[in-house]
Image (spheres, grey):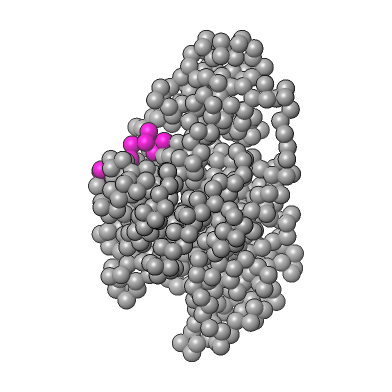
Amino acid sequence: MATTPAAQQDRTLLVTGGTVHTLTPAGRAEALAVRGERIVHAGTAEECGAALDGRVDERLDLGGRQLMPGFVDAHCHPVMYGQNLAWADVRPETVADIDALVAALRRHAEGLRQEAPLRGFGYEHRRLAEGRHPTCQDLDRVATDREVYVMNASGHGGVVNTYTLHKYGITAGTPDPVGGRIGRTASGEPNGELWDGACDLLTGPDGVKITNHGPNFHLDDPADIMRGHLLRAQQTFLAAGVTTIGDAQASRRELSTYLRARDAGDLRMRTSVYLTSALLDTALDLGLGSELGDDQLRIQGVKLYADGTLGGWTAYFPEGYAADCCNHGQLYHDPAEYADLVLRAHRAGFQTATHAQSPYAIGMVLDAVEKALADTPRTDPRHRVEHCGLPTDDEITRMRELGVHAVLQPQHHLRTGDGTLTAIGEMGHRYNPAGLLQSAGTEFAFSSDAPVAPPRPFEAVAAAASRETVLGTRLGTPEMRLAVADGIRAHTLGGARALHRENEVGSLRPGAFADFVVTDADPYRTDDLARLATAGVDETWIGARQVWSATA
Ligand SMILES: [Zn+2]
């Protein structure tokens, strides 16, 4: 591993000439003193100079700009995001119908090797003009001699062409795999759709298998291409001012990619990894449990799934959906099986992070956590509910009592709030009620879930403050909105706490890493949320080193 030479460990940096937002009780400072990678003091320029014993190796003059802690994105999928960025873009913003989707894939093929699989990311069937998923026949118009796959925006599955069905031996006689579904025509022939555990079929005999532990988006590429995916994603995070991330579903594909990037000196973001619960037995066999790793890269916990997605209408509502009372969505495990997974992870010392959207699913998580805590008391395990879209008031209170953190994505209600209202009716107005969590004293963090939404922390903060969707619908009541200052905290210190990293990142306190961003606009100016949503970052620094600059 790379070590820092003694001279660099002692190198000093003095930041002056602007406003330093510390995210500590002091709030603001005019200067920042840094020695090595860590902050020594935040205060007046005079105090900071004195804190460095008058020796300044490097100066950063803010020139009237603002400085704040680097953002923490506590739930995202960088490897998948980078991979998706390299695929054809078939999001609703780009393709209006299936003809356009086919055309986008054909264009994408022009830049690829002839034998390479042809993949696209991000279609949403309800927003295609046809209002349906593409079929294998639609994708046969793209190619009949190579693999074609379009992944749904949810990441929980998608559609392949006939060549791919044949290649992996998927026929009318193939049973639905555990935890998955093969889409079929009325006569039982596969129609190209593969969901959740059925995507295990696409990773080939030696590939990553997730079974009923969630979606399988772990399609492999050669090591050098995987490295490119990670670095492509990392650039996007750094450009958005994100300096620490939580990878919310890691298999060997992710961990090996991070390790190679770290060994090559390419990994810049501080990375906390949550292993898919499909690997829980393996992790326990290895004796893993409490955090393993260092300030750069660590295994932090286990990622589990309670229910499905709101966007895909697979989040679990026992009473059915408003738009389709026959559809109830799905659970990945029955409550007893799920509680056993949480208990075993908890006993070993892992932090758990469970995807749960509906009130039922969130309740299932809280029941399991309560049981695990009663079985094996642990100090401050901070089990997490990921997304936590629709918690009831009682559940918000229970979360506080159990010390459970919610990890929300305000960019989701911004983009899909209207679809959620259609799907589940009035209850959709409660989607992401950050203001209610804030007033209840329940801890929460903001995140992007990239690739589901791009990493744009200011957009997330503005979306939580306005609760307005892209179509202009105002969701819920004013008390569900979250003040901008609290939103910034949720995307910095809140994220750091969700990752058990608050002593290192998320605020500019003495002893923390000098991970910060420089912005032109005042992030605390709240009179123009549209402007805040599109605010950019001038510079991003990690460990007192500039890692990204808008002018570089
Ligand atoms: Zn996710």
Horizontally, residue 395 falls left or right of residue 547, namely left
The residue lying furthest to the bottom in this view is 187
The magenta stretch is 478-489
Where does residue 412 sit, x and y in percent of width and height? 42, 53
Where does residue 68 sit, x and y in percent of width and height? 49, 29
Q: Residue at x 44, y 29 (%)?
A: 23
Q: Residue at x 38, y 67 (%)?
A: 335
- Height in image: 50 above or below 269? above
Horizontally, residue 153 falls left or right of residue 550, namely left
Task: Give residue 296's quadrant in the image.
Answer: top right
Quadrant location, the N terminus: top right
Task: Give residue 461's quadrant in the image.
Answer: top left
* Residue 471 in view in this figure: no
Reply yes or no: does residue 120 show up in magenta: no
Q: Residue at x 40, y 47 (%)?
A: 405
Q: 501 or 552, which lies in front?
A: 501
Horizontally, residue 166 falls left or right of residue 358, namely right
